């Protein structure tokens, strides 16, 4: 059966003042799908996530779960189920792991909050061992796990992650990978911005490549993209 995508973006732009850094981006994400958004430094990947989540000025049509949200403020988009885990992770460093998870869960219906916090701890057991620890005192990898845990505690339908492996030890990659795959199997749509292509390719169902603010390639579902091909697209050669 055909079902509408979870997120459907058409002709989306992102701009800072008069400077447009993304233009005419059309991208859709299905439930239970991980889309890796790749592209060189400065391509506009972070800005595109910002435009979709409402924290960077943008234009175009953005439909989430049937609701046009392109003109809604960021907090309304969050209530519709969109969650961004930003590069800086967006944690409250002074607060404990438990408090961060609780704050994240406030976007979820009250009756589901504990179940969702438990799910976060199931995916990242270390969080359960560290519930009383100050978030800011944890390792980078633990903080990244908490950032994802905090996001999913709020019952998102669409999770957008900006370079979650940045600065982390390879030992954390596998935990993160398994968590993303499990969340996908829970039915979430996931957009993953990654510089680490091997990691992106190991979880993605589909790849989109942004160069100079424009999508220059989109893979079909099930098709990711070989590194050589990616380099050719980046450089415009071939
Ligand atoms: P990176 O991987 O290096 O973070 P990116 O693909 O995420 O790159 P963006 O960070 O979205 O790219 O940047 C896209 C363009 O927007 C760049 O030219 C950048 O200089 C510009 N830009 C980003 N943030 C701002 C801002 N706050 N004000 C003005 N221009 C900005």
Image: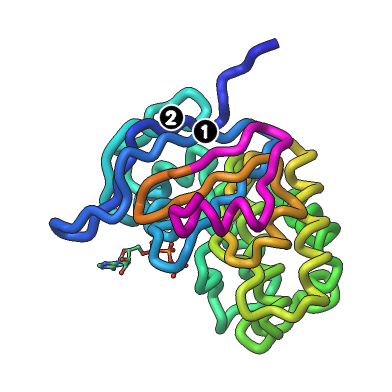
SS of the residue at dot 2?
Answer: strand
Q: Is residue 176 above or below residue 65?
A: below
Q: Is residue 227 above or below residue 139?
A: above
Check the image and name the residue furthest to the top.
Answer: 1
Neighbor class of circle 1 (other Cα within 10 Å; few <14, some 14-19, many 20+) is: some
* The residue carrying mark 2 has its beta carbon less than 8 Å from ligand 1: no
Does the CB distance between marks 2 and 1 fall below 8 Å? no
- Image side of residue 109 versus residue 203, left or right: left
Of 213 and 105, nearer the camera is 213
* The residue carrying mark 1 has its beta carbon less than 8 Å from ligand 1: no
Pointer 2 or 1: first along the chain: 1
Answer yes or no: is residue 109 visible: no
- Image side of residue 21 versus residue 140, left or right: left
Q: CA distance from mark 2 to mark 1?
A: 9 Å
**Residue 189, labelled with which disc?**
none
Q: Give the residue displayed 66% in from the left and 89% down from the top.
A: 137
Residue holding disc 2? 63
Boundaries of the magenta span: 217-238
Of 217 and 61, nearer the camera is 217
Residue 43 figure quarter: bottom left
Answer yes or no: is residue 212 visible: yes
Q: Quadrant of the N terminus?
A: top right
SS of the residue at dot 1?
Answer: strand
Residue 159 position in % (x across, y down): 59, 48
Reply yes or no: does residue 227 show up in magenta. Answer: yes
Residue 9 position in % (x across, y down): 42, 34
Residue 56 position in % (x across, y down): 31, 55
């Amino acid at each position: 059966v055909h079902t509408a995508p979870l997120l459907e973006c058409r002709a989306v732009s992102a701009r800072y003042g008069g400077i447009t850094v993304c233009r005419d981006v059309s991208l859709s994400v299905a439930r239970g799908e991980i889309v890796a958004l790749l592209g060189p430094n400065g391509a506009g990947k972070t800005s595109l996530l910002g435009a979709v989540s409402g924290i960077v000025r943008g234009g175009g049509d953005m439909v989430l779960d049937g609701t046009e949200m392109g003109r809604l403020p960021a907090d309304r988009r969050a209530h519709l189920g969109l969650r961004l885990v930003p590069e800086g992770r967006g944690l409250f460093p002074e607060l404990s792991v438990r408090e961060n998870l609780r704050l994240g869960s406030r976007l979820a219906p009250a009756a589901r909050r504990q179940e969702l916090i438990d799910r976060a701890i199931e995916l990242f057991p270390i969080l359960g061992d560290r519930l009383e620890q100050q978030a800011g005192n944890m390792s980078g990898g633990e903080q990244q796990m908490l950032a994802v845990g905090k996001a999913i505690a709020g019952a998102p339908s669409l999770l957008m992650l900006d370079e979650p492996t940045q600065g982390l030890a390879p030992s954390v990659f596998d935990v993160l990978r398994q968590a993303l795959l499990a969340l996908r199997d829970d039915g979430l749509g996931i957009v993953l911005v990654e510089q680490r292509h091997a990691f992106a390719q190991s979880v993605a169902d589909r790849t989109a490549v942004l160069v100079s603010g424009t999508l220059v390639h989109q893979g079909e579902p099930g098709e990711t993209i070989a590194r050589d091909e990616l380099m050719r697209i980046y450089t415009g050669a071939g």
